[in-house]
Image (cartoon, rainbow, N blue to C red):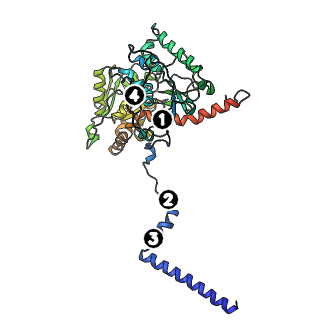
Amino acid sequence: MSVCGKQRYSRSVLGLVFFALLTVTYLFLIGTIDVRSHIVPFLQFEPLDPNPSWVVPTCRSLTPLRVYMYDLPPRFNVGMLNRRSSDKTPVTAATLPPWPTSSGLRKQHSVEYWMMSSLLYDGGGEERETEMEAVRVLDPDVADVFFVPFFSSLSFNTYGHNMTDPQTELDKKLQVDTLKFLKGSKYWQRSGGRDHVIPMHHPNAFRFLRDQVNASILIVADFGRYPKSLSNLRKDVVAPYVHVVDSYTEDESSDPFEARPTLLFFRGRTVRKDEGVIRAKLANVLDGYNDVHYETSFASEENIRLSTEGMRSSKFCLHPAGDTPSSCRLFDAIVSHCVPVIVSDQIELPFEDELDYSQFSIFFSAKEALKPGYMVKQLRRIPKERWVSMWKRLKKISHHFEFQHPPKSGDAVNMIWRQVRHKLPAAKLADHRTRRLKIPDWWG
């Protein structure tokens, strides 16, 4: 090509480019092409949501946890609910007895029952697997974890509650027989129990042989009576108590702040051990306020009714430590939509990797709470708008603390199974390391 030809070619290309740019510019100006929708998103960030949706777990895990449940005779579990039942009748969805309505305080540690019932539930068809966090498998070789259906909390409450009662031997025998059964299982032997789930919600549950199952994933209320070598937050699951008061399902006041005239409410035992000694001290600190209700009471049907009414008419509900850092009162407050005021320095809270309790609870150290006038003064300073925001948050998250049969997506038992899934990687790591170590573990 000649020099002139090359020049004419270059001018033609430049002309086409200029025409194209001119056309695009014109279309952009008249709105036919929205260039910003293609370019601007790469140049800006979405503003941070002050109340992000991830704080409340709204979706389940991708696939259900596969759980193999050992076939223990009814005397280890539901047989304690009805001692006239036959120990030879297998526990199925059809033979599962309902949790008794007259069980009193035994209900608060009945987590073991609800976990077992969730695995026995066989309704819902394909929808079940899309909503449930865990499903029962009948082939242990495909299981992710192994559930041990020994009701250790109910066993203590049934046989060993008085500690020195001769029936305590029945509680001990069930623990011995459970351990004997597990040690005979090749799946327990394979992992040393690390992939086994054992409910021990009552602080005195499985008390004779705890140290022989300390590698397992334990379902506990708190760590108040466990040494760190036996139970800790790294491997175990903190589960809520089963609330004793009825859930407040009709809490639809147009002005909930004014509808609750009591500032701070507490009703329960004030003579407790360990950290719980603070309860008697708080009785003196909180005396003399017209809008503070602090009363000593014992569990009875009438007192539970009065507590229900009191929580529903109060803005804040006090949760001081009991014999251990936790108590059922916190979860009664949550389902009553009464903002919990937590005074328990060593409490661990259920589902805290998914729920931010500071969005619907107030915390004081024991030292702060015992300063005369301090706690009440701080509560009075909380603006109405902030309290209403916390009340709304309680209504939004309270379903995560409901135990029910059949189970529902996002309820308490499904949240517990999701926590078990979270603990599983650490259990698998410990299991695999143990298999290959030739010397004592240098991590202790």
Q: Nearer the N terminus, badge 4 or badge 2?
A: 2
> Mark 3 belongs to which amino acid?
Asp
Q: Give me the C-alpha separation between circle 1 and circle 3.
A: 47 Å
Secondary element type, mark 2: loop
Q: Nearer the N terminus, badge 1 or badge 2?
A: 2
> Mark 2 belongs to which amino acid?
Phe
Secondary element type, mark 1: strand
Q: For residue 372, say whether it is visible.
A: no
Q: Nearer the N terminus, badge 4 or badge 1?
A: 1
Secondary element type, mark 4: loop
Identify the disc placed on residue 34: 3
Instruction: Using residue 291 as the reference point, say whether residue 184 is left or right of it.
Output: right
Identify the disc placed on residue 134: 1
Instruction: Using residue 257 as the reference point, say whether residue 57 is left or right of it.
Output: right
Q: Residue furthest bottom?
A: 4
Residue 434 sits in quarter: top right
Q: Nearer the N terminus, badge 3 or badge 2?
A: 3
> Mark 1 belongs to which amino acid?
Ala
